[in-house]
Amino acid sequence: MLRVLGLTLLLTLSGYAIAEPIADTHSEMSGCESCHVDSEPSADLDYENGACVECHGFLKEFADETHQKHFEILACSDCHLAHDEANPNDSCAKCH
Ligand code: HEC
Ligand code: HEC
Ligand code: HEC
Ligand code: HEC
C-alpha cells in the first residue's frame, strides 16, 4: 500500500518522465544506495535485482503477462538497463 501511496505523491509533486534512465529517477527519489552498496554495482547484480524486487514485488505479482511470463527465468536487469534511456520493449529481440 505504501508503494501505491508513494506513486501518487511522486506523480503529484514532481511529474513523471518515462524517458529518463531508471537510475536517475530512482536516485532522485532515494539515492544510489537504494540499489547499490557504496554506489558500486555488484559483480552479478544480485544485490541490485533484489532491491528492485523489494520495492516492486516479484515478476509473478505484476499485472501484465510480459513480466509474469519471466518469473524465475529472468532478472529485472535482463530487460531494464538502469543507466540508459533504453526502452525495455527493445530487449525482446535479444532472446526471442
Ligand atoms: C534503480 C537502481 C539503481 C540506481 C538508483 C543506481 N543504479 Fe547504478 N546500476 C544499476 C544496475 C542494475 C546496473 C547494471 C547495469 C545496468 O543495468 O545499467 C548499474 C550499474 C552501475 C555502474 C556500472 C557502470 C554502468 O554504468 O553500467 C556504476 C558505476 C553505477 N551503477 C553507479 C551508480 C551511481 C553512482 C548511482 C547514483 C547516482 C547509481 N548507480 C544509481 C542500478 C542502479
Ligand atoms: C527503494 C525502492 C525502489 C527500488 C530499489 C527500485 N524501485 Fe523502481 N520505482 C520505485 C518507485 C517508488 C517508482 C515510482 C512509482 C512506480 O512506478 O512504481 C519506481 C518506478 C520504476 C519504473 C518506472 C519508470 C521510472 O524510471 O520511474 C521502472 C521501470 C522501475 N521502477 C524499475 C526498477 C528496476 C528495474 C529496479 C532495480 C534495478 C528498481 N526499479 C528499483 C521504487 C523502487
Ligand atoms: C522480459 C523483460 C522484462 C523483465 C524481465 C522485466 N521487465 Fe519491467 N518492463 C518491461 C517492459 C517491456 C516494460 C514497458 C511496458 C511499456 O510501457 O511498454 C516494463 C515496465 C516496467 C515498469 C513500469 C510499468 C509497470 O508495469 O509498472 C516497472 C515498474 C517495471 N517494468 C519493473 C520491473 C521490475 C522491478 C522487474 C524485475 C522484478 C522487471 N520490470 C523485469 C520488460 C521487463
Ligand atoms: C534475456 C533473455 C530474454 C529476454 C530479454 C526476453 N525474454 Fe521472453 N523468455 C525468455 C525465456 C528463456 C523464456 C522461457 C522459455 C520460453 O518459453 O521461450 C521466455 C518466455 C517468454 C514468454 C512465454 C512464452 C510461452 O510460451 O509461455 C513470452 C510471452 C515472452 N518471453 C515474451 C517476451 C517479451 C515480450 C520480451 C521483451 C519485452 C521478452 N520476452 C524478453 C527469455 C527472454
Image (tube, grey):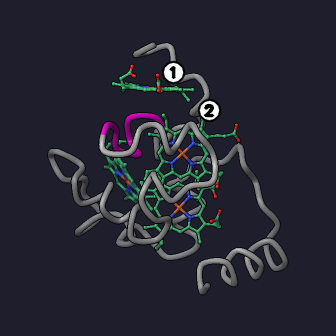
> Which residue has dot 1 on it?
92
Q: Is residue 43 above or below residue 47?
A: above
> Which residue has dot 2 on it?
87
Helix, strand or loop at mark 2? loop
Q: Is residue 2 above or below residue 17?
A: below
Q: Amino acid at mark 1?
A: Cys
Helix, strand or loop at mark 1? helix
Q: Nearer the viewer, residue 10 or 73?
A: 73
User: Residue 31 appears at what percent x and percent y?
Assistant: 45, 72
Residue at screen point 30% across, 64% down: 36
Which range is magenta? 73-79
Residue at screen point 61% across, 84% down: 1
Disc number for residue 80: none
User: Residue 34 appears at what percent x and percent y?
Assistant: 39, 71
Q: Amino acid at mark 2?
A: Asn
Q: Nearer the viewer, residue 60 or 28?
A: 60
Instruction: Inspect the magenta stretch and tell me whether residue 21 lies in it.
Output: no
Is residue 10 left or right of 49 when viewed as pictured? right
Residue at screen point 40% across, 16% down: 95
Disc 1 CB within 8 Å of nearest ligand 4 atom:
yes
User: Residue 96 appears at what percent x and percent y?
Assistant: 45, 13
